[in-house]
Amino acid sequence: MEKLVEEVKRRFKPKIKPIEWRGDRLILLDQRRLPFETRYVEARTVAEVADAIRNMVVRGAPAIGITAAFGMVISLLESRPKTVQEALAVLASARDQLSKTRPTAVNLFWALDRMYNKAQALATSTTSVEELEAGLEKEAVAIFEEELEAEIRMGLYGAELLEDGDTVLTICNAGGLATGTGLGTATAPIYVANMLGKRVSVVAPETRPWQQGARLTVYELVQNGVNTTLIADTAVGLVMYRKLINLVMVGADRVLLDGHVYNKIGTLNEAVLAREFGIPFYVLAPTSTIDPRSRVEDVKIEERDPDEVRTARSEQGVVYVTMRDVPVYNPVFDVTPPKYITGIITERGIATQPLHKTLRRLLKS
């Protein structure tokens, strides 16, 4: 495995860089504009980082976590505290501000807690604010690098499930745009399989209301040379019925220890249909996405602006597709019960049924 990990690192050269750290600021690819315009947003303050997460300049659980980690570093560069204790107060405030941006993606809270805990540990061994800043910057870079390695490992585990000529159905965007690395979670096995000489294709539903499938997944897969077909969300059942796909691979914004998976709205539809038609359904997520504490009743599912459903994005901009005042229910995520999931692929291996047992074993490994 280790040799293969290094080989993939060497060979994979993503054409898209969603997140770039410049030492004193973040450069974020504005995913709201894709695929029609390539525009970057610069974030030099905590407020700018929070706005980028909240307004979906950056999106996808791992990418949100990486962005938030660098946001903690930015808080110190912005405030210039004079003592380590002042720095800890600044970091606590930044953590609070950033934690309120997206309530469902567990990587956000995982990254913020990791950065703050690292700061507390550093504060016991140094009185230098400069050393604290350097240590936190190193930690944020480590979060990015660990995410990339985790995706490579998930890609290798997932590629073993793919045969030459297979077609994968996904949803939303769980590619490199969503993770910040260029590789992705659900797309990692596809890229790795193609590197290993297997011809793997993708069917991508448009994923309303933000059209992440149509705008983002199709864009990055085509950019990276993967044979990709776009379908309407409502075509998923027929695609399965006609055996046009071999398996489903999706990402996750939160995975509970009992196997419940929170992902883009529409994931549950795919899982139920896949079970009906006997198609394997896999979730890909790093262990940082596993929430060891929450129960289903604890998780708040984010609801967003009704205009996201009333409108659609096009090259000409956002256009209304219905009445401007029609009532809207716009949950961003749904929850897939474990009985519909064949397995959850992590960087530590594949959790299979019963998920409530195998996930615990993976976390202990």
Image (cartoon, helix red, strand yellow):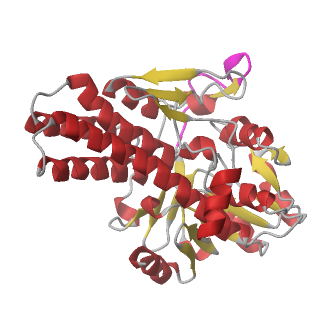
Instruction: Give the total number of marks visible in the rendering.
Output: 0
Where is residue 168 drawn, in percent x and y?
78, 60
Seen at 80% across and 40% down, the residue is 222
Residue 365 is drawn in which quadrant? bottom left
Can residue 60 be seen in the rendering of this structure?
Answer: yes
Residue 240 is drawn in which quadrant? bottom right
Q: Quadrant of the N terminus?
A: bottom right
Where is residue 10 drawn, in percent x and y?
66, 52
Seen at 49% across and 72% down, the residue is 259
Where is residue 138 drawn, in percent x and y?
35, 44
Question: Viewed as shown, does residue 171 lie left or right of 40?
Answer: right
Magenta stretch contains residue 324: yes
Seen in the picture, residue 137 relative to 157 is either above or below; the reply is: above
Magenta stretch contains residue 18: no
Question: Viewed as shown, does residue 133 lie left or right of 306?
Answer: left
Seen in the picture, residue 358 relative to 69 is either above or below; the reply is: below
Seen at 77% across and 38% down, the residue is 223
Seen in the picture, residue 99 relative to 365 is either above or below; the reply is: above
Where is residue 262 drawn, in percent x and y?
51, 58
Seen at 70% across and 37% down, the residue is 15
Question: Viewed as shown, does residue 209 lie left or right of 232?
Answer: left
State the residue lying farthest toward the top: 316
Overall secondary structure of the magenta section: loop
Can residue 105 be seen in the rendering of this structure?
Answer: no
Q: Nearer the viewer, residue 151 or 133?
A: 133
Question: Viewed as shown, does residue 156 lie left or right of 291?
Answer: right
Range of magenta residues:
314-330
